[in-house]
Every structure is written in C-alpha cells, then in structure tokens.
Amino acid sequence: MTDEQHDTSTPDPDDVVETPAAPEPAAAAERRDRHGSVVAAAPRRNGPSMGQIIVGGFLVLIGTGWLLEAADIADVPWRAILPSALMLIGLGLIIGARTARHGGVIALGVVLTLAVGAASAVEVLADIPLSGGIGEESATVTGPINDEYRHAIGKYVVDLRSAPVPAAGDDTEISLGIGELIVIVPDGVDLVIDARAGLGNVIVFGQESAGVGPDIDYTTPEAGDAVLRLDVDVAIGQVEVRR
C-alpha cells in the first residue's frame, strides 16, 4: 500500500475532535411556591393598566367641564367633580375585579373619599366664622331673636322656647364650627328649618341623616305668616333640633 492510499483503519477515539453542541435557549426562570411546586407565570398584559384608564378618564372629565365653562355653554358644578371621580374608580374596580390586583387604584379611591368628606366640611366651614368662643356654652333667648348665633368649637346649646316668634319671619342663622350643636324650639310655633353638616350627623325631631354633607329640611305643614325660620349649620360634628 502506497503513501498516496488512504488509511481505512478505525480512528483512535482519543484523536476524534467533538463538535460542541449548540447551546439550548435559556429557560425562563420558574416561580415556585413554598412547597416547591411550579407556579404558572401570569400572562403579560398589553395595553394600559386600570389605573391609567381611570386617571385618563378623570382628566377627560375635568377637561370637558373646563371647556364647557370656558365656552359659556354650561355652568359646571365643580363640587361634583370629586364624587364623579370616586364613582369612576368604583366602576373601574368592578369591571377589573377579576383581572389583577388594583392596590394603587384602591388607595386612590380612599384618598378621594377623604377628599370628598373634607371638601364638604370645608364648604360649610367657609360659611361659618370661627368666632364665639371655645368650650361648652348655652344661650337662653327670652327677648327678640337675633339674626345669628355662633360658636367656634365645643358644645353649643341655643334655647328658643321663651323667645317671641318674629312677625316678619326673618331667617336666624345658628352655627358651630366643630362639636355638638343643640337648638331647642318652642311648641306650637310654625317652623322652617334647614339643618346641615359638612361631616357628621343631623337630627331634626327624630329624623336623622349622617355621613358626608347630611342635610335635613323641615317645614310645618300649612305654616302661617308668623314662622320661625332657622338655618342651623355645623362644619364637623352633630347638629340636633328638638322641642
């Protein structure tokens, strides 16, 4: 056999050069629970999140109201903006209840709830000068009724049972900033009462309303000309009208 002839003998295994296999794609990291079981990865969500949709809707709501007012098309009740946003958040949570967690949206809803309550209290408080003292005070009226009775903070009792009814029927404003306000009215007198609170309770002859911005209106049926008209307000706390 000449040198030009090929060697057909079996090659030595040590002389064989192995070609490295192509590396396999790296597997995604597996999530496991505390028992070692593989937890399926949550599918990736495409598109805006629920929080982005709600914030975007809120901005559209404000922008639309601003545009309508700037163009003199409508007089927008801005006090309704915060409650509307709160309703928008609640609707979003209902629609997306099964999709994912919405901790940030819930936190925003809590903040807006507190803001709605604060706004109602501030609205009433803005109409109430914080004057008249602090602590417990009583006013027993035996002469002509004044146009207003005010107290800042504490418990305030206004007793009108011995006061003559104004013939002209002018409104009398009785207000308290923070605390408990009690107004006692005489028997057998025609009444027109508007009692409200920014945040708290309102009780008028046993009828009660509580929460954010409670308001009770009472008018004596078939009231005559001699009427005792009372506007009774408390910013934060309780107001009660009784006999």
Image: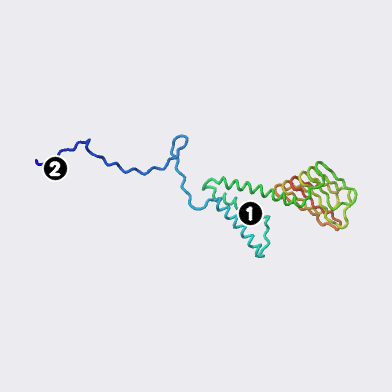
Which secondary structure, mark 2? loop
Q: Is residue 220 left or right of residue 68?
A: right
Tag 2: Cα neighbours inside 10 Å, few (<14), some, or many (≥20)?
few
Residue type, numbered disc 1: Ser
Residue placed furthest toward the top: 35
Asked whether 103 or 191 is in front, the reply is: 103
Q: Give residue 227's quadrant in the image.
A: bottom right
Q: What scheme was used to colour the molecule?
A: rainbow
**Image position of 105 (left or right of 79):** left
Relative vertical location of residue 8 with respect to residue 189 in this rendering, above or below: above
In the displayed image of the protein, which residue is found farthest to the front? 3
Label 1: which secondary element: helix
- Near mark 1 (Cα within 10 A), the count class, few <14, some 14-19 or many ≥20, is some
Nearest the camera: 145 or 167? 145
The image shows residue 181 at horizontal and vertical percentages of 79, 45
Task: For the residues labelled 1 and 2, say whether their Cβ atoms are less than 8 Å apart.
Answer: no
Residue to which mark 2 is pinned = 6
Which of disc 2 and disc 1 is earlier in sequence?
2
Q: Which residue is mark 1?
A: 84
Residue 186 image offset from top left, x and y in percent: 86, 49
Q: Residue at x 24, y 39 (%)?
A: 17
**Quarter of the picture holding the N terminus:** top left
x and y percent of residue 240 in the render? 78, 46
Residue 237 image point, x, y percent: 75, 45
Which kind of residue does numbered mark 2 sit on? His
Give the total of numbered labels: 2
Q: Which quarter of the picture shows residue 70?
A: bottom right
> Residue at 17% of width from left, 38% of height from top?
10
Q: Measure how far apart labels 1 and 2 are at the Cα level.
A: 91 Å
Quadrant hosting residue 178: top right
